[in-house]
Image: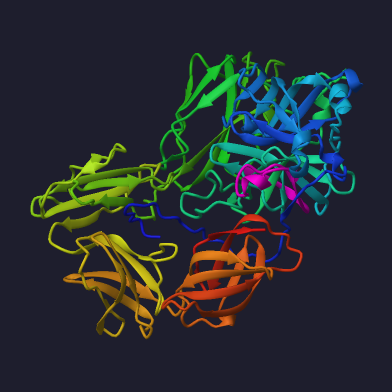
Amino acid sequence: MRGFVLLGVLCMGAGLNAPLVAAPSSRLLENRDGQNRAFTGIGRLSLSTSCTAFFIRTPGGSNAPAYALAAGHCYSISANEIFVNQALPASTRPVRFRYFVDTQEQQVAVPVRRLAYSTMRGWDVAVIELAATSGELQAQGLMPLQLEPAEPAPGTAISVVGAPGSNFPSADQFLRQSRCTLGERADLIEFTWHFWNVRRNDCEDIVGGVSGSPVISERTGNVVGIVNTTTHLAFQSGADFDCYAGRPCEISGGVQKVEEETSYSIPVAGLLGCFSDNGDFAHDRAACPLPRAAPRIAVSHAGRNRPPGTAWNAAIAGDAAYYRYKTMVAGTGDCRDAAGYSAPVSREARGTIEDRLPEAENRYLMCVIGGGSPEAGHPSWQLPRDAVVLIARTDATPPILPPLYRITAMPMEEMSLAFDFLPPELSSYEFKIGTPDSTRCAEPGYRIYRRIPVSLPDGGPYRICLRATDEADNAQPPLDMIVGRGAVILPTGVTHAAGFRPDVFAPGQWISMYGLDLRGAAPRLRDASGGERPLEIGFASETQINARLPLDAPAGQAHIVLGEQAEPVRIASLSPGIFLTEQTQANEILAYATGLAAARTGDLRAWIGKLELTVIEVTGAGIPGVEVVRLRLPEGSGLQGLQFLQLVAGPVRSNRRGAVLR
């Protein structure tokens, strides 16, 4: 998509690799006849966000305290904090168990007594003590789930049972089951978080609210993991977005790679070792694998993205008088390995690690452990498995995406300039405004945009210079525009009418042009042969024109011409873009699209996630420039709720368009 936005926000489509295999979707669970009573101990949890939690079987029998597990990020997204024995505010909602769609009147609301433990340091787990005993909950018909004592082999058939809080109509946001397959182990980084030895899976419908759900072995019925994160719904990819929030990367062999359409879970093997024979939880028990909170060590640094060669500037705080550390390219070492750590360093003498990051662009980890003695072998030292891990990415590449800006021109009101942010790629903006002759975009004098729309001068002409900067302070070349000399298409203002991509257009498709003083303007296409012809106008206002390209426009480099202005565009044979979707009664989806005037059935492929759909036919919709793509869902796919459809024609991919399926 081009970066121009006018009186609206444009959605961006992810660049997905061609999926190869299908994964099942989830089904809504019912329990009127007790057919799913094994899942009565799974419920809706609301802490800092809506999640799923599940009641677990622990030692100690019926008199033992009742505990539920969930994901650590359901409580806090702090990357390295460890929370122990936290009192929760009185406003904390109870966990609502027996959370089935057909027996809502039978829900059991159980108050939370305390947050026994929560962390995102290498793990993503929360242990919640409920205000009841295990026996009291079982007496109310809630069945605890047993934790699997050992990790199962890859290929194990699993189910994820959770309650989504998004992507489904509210009437369907109850317990759902996705049946799928457990994958291999992987180490992950995502945003500021790191996770060791998570397990891949191909489960579908891992959406908001499903975090914390149990991953259950189909063979034993025991829990083998806790839902952690996914790449399913990330709409941005490449550039700075990989390994950022919503785009977790697997790290191995010095490479950080996003596995598309993949979900991950935290293994629970060993967690029963955190409970005493009486059923009491303690994270510092010898058999408990969770990272320990003492001695507390906190490490902060200048930011996740920064220029190469800059200092880590990692400030050490907490209870530990000494620390040890090491750094590595993400995926080349392991913080849990004692090898490579520095000698003990006094925090009082050197409270900040100022080592320089390498000059090469990459992602790096810093591992820090704390202790109370200058002797590395002293028992006061944290184990390497408990290390704080910082993530830094060295980035010398300016933003690839153009600025997301909008100029608002309302009748009887002054014009204004505003920007939209898309971190880490578009993290800040600078601009300057002046007369055309005295203002030079290549010279200093820019002002920082403070998230308050900027009033533009009355009349004109005047020059606007603007540029975007990423999180590492890399600035892109400025956009240069002159406003006030009549009709003008603003820079990056020619887009695909469906999906707002700027890069490829097709004969006969609709495009959108954004600018100023456009009402009555007559844009033309100068095609690859050099010939010019007018565009068919479908809509025109002062700030936008929707136009249709000629059906016989040849492929190649072309320009949209308006007066003396010529905006470059590229013409290909096909450029799919989806306006809207509709499900039929015949297990089919109709995609209303543009950019497919010359398409034949064999020219297109279509996917929802990793599930490939059959392209039945491409026909006209009865509206010039709009085509209907008729698609068939595979038998037994079970797709439900909000899914995202994408069409592919050779190397060109459409926007991802939502389709609500039932």
Judging depth in this view, the residue of 136 and 228 nearest the camera is 136
Write the residue at 26% across / 59% down.
543
Q: Please state the horizontal and vertical placement of residue 431, each as a whole percent of the image.
A: 23, 45
Q: Please state the horizontal and vertical placement of residue 225, each as a whole percent of the image.
A: 76, 40
Write the residue at 90% across / 44% down.
220
Judging depth in this view, the residue of 250 and 266 nearest the camera is 266
> Relative to 635, is 100 above or below?
above
Where are the magenta residues, as a range?
A: 161-188
Write the residue at 14% across / 63% down.
486
Judging depth in this view, the residue of 627 and 216 nearest the camera is 627
- Horizontal side of 427 relative to 480 (left or right) equals right
> Relative to 444, is 114 above or below?
above
Q: Quadrant of the N terminus?
A: bottom left
> Relative to 590, is 429 above or below?
above
Residue 359 counted in the magenta span: no
- Horizontal side of 634 relative to 520 (left or right) equals right
Q: Can I make out residue 447 in this image?
A: yes
Write the residue at 67% across / 26% down.
118
Q: Please state the horizontal and vertical placement of residue 598, each as a whole percent of the image.
A: 47, 83
Q: Can I make out residue 289 in this image?
A: no
Judging depth in this view, the residue of 580 and 558 nearest the camera is 580
Q: Please state the horizontal and vertical placement of residue 560, each as a whole percent of the image.
A: 27, 72
* The quarter of the displayed image where residue 400 is located: bottom left
* The quarter of the displayed image where residue 638 is located: bottom right
Q: Residue furthest front?
A: 105
Q: Quadrant of the C terminus?
A: bottom right
